[in-house]
Image (tube, rainbow, N blue to C red):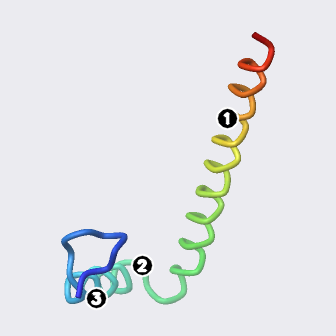
Amino acid sequence: MTPLFIGGIGMQEVLLIVLVVLLFFGGKKIPELMKGIGKGVRSFKEGMNNIEKEVEDSEQKK
C-alpha cells in the first residue's frame, strides 16, 4: 500500500522515516517542529493568495 501524497514510498519506509525523526528530535521537540512547519505553510499559502489577487486585479484593469 502506497500513500497517495508520497508516490513510490511504501508504508515501511514512512515508518522508518518517522522513527528516525523521532530519535533525532526527541518526543518533546516534535510538536514545536510541526508548529513551525504549519506556520510556514500558512505563510506560503497567504503569499500565494496575495499574488493571485494581484494578478487578477491587474488582468481586470486591462
- Alpha carbon separation for disc pair 1 and 2: 36 Å
Residue 58, image quadrant: top right
Q: Is residue 52 above or below residue 41?
A: above
The percent position of residue 56, horizontal first and vertical second, equals 72, 28
- Alpha carbon separation for disc pair 2 and 3: 15 Å
Residue type (three-letter) at the residue carrying disc 3: Leu
**Of callouts 1 and 3, which one flags the residue occurring earlier in the amino acid sequence?**
3
Residue under label 3: 15
- Residue located at (66% from left, 57% from top): 42
Q: Is residue 51 left or right of residue 17?
A: right
Q: Helix or strand or loop: what does disc 3 sit on?
A: helix
Residue type (three-letter) at the residue carrying disc 2: Phe
Mark 2 vs mark 3, foreground winner is 3
- Nearest the eye: 6 or 23: 6
Residue under label 2: 25
- Residue located at (80% from left, 14% from top): 61
Residue 50, image quadrant: top right
- Alpha carbon separation for disc pair 1 and 3: 37 Å
Q: Is residue 22 above or below residue 42?
A: below
- Residue located at (34% from left, 84% from top): 18
- Nearest the eye: 42 or 35: 42
Mark 1 vs mark 3, foreground winner is 1
Q: Helix or strand or loop: what does disc 1 sit on?
A: helix
Q: Helix or strand or loop: what does disc 2 sit on?
A: helix
Residue under label 1: 52
- Nearest the eye: 60 or 1: 60
Mark 1 vs mark 2, foreground winner is 1
The percent position of residue 37, horizontal first and vertical second, equals 56, 64
**Of callouts 2 and 3, which one flags the residue occurring earlier in the amino acid sequence?**
3
The percent position of residue 49, horizontal first and vertical second, equals 69, 42
Residue type (three-letter) at the residue carrying disc 1: Glu
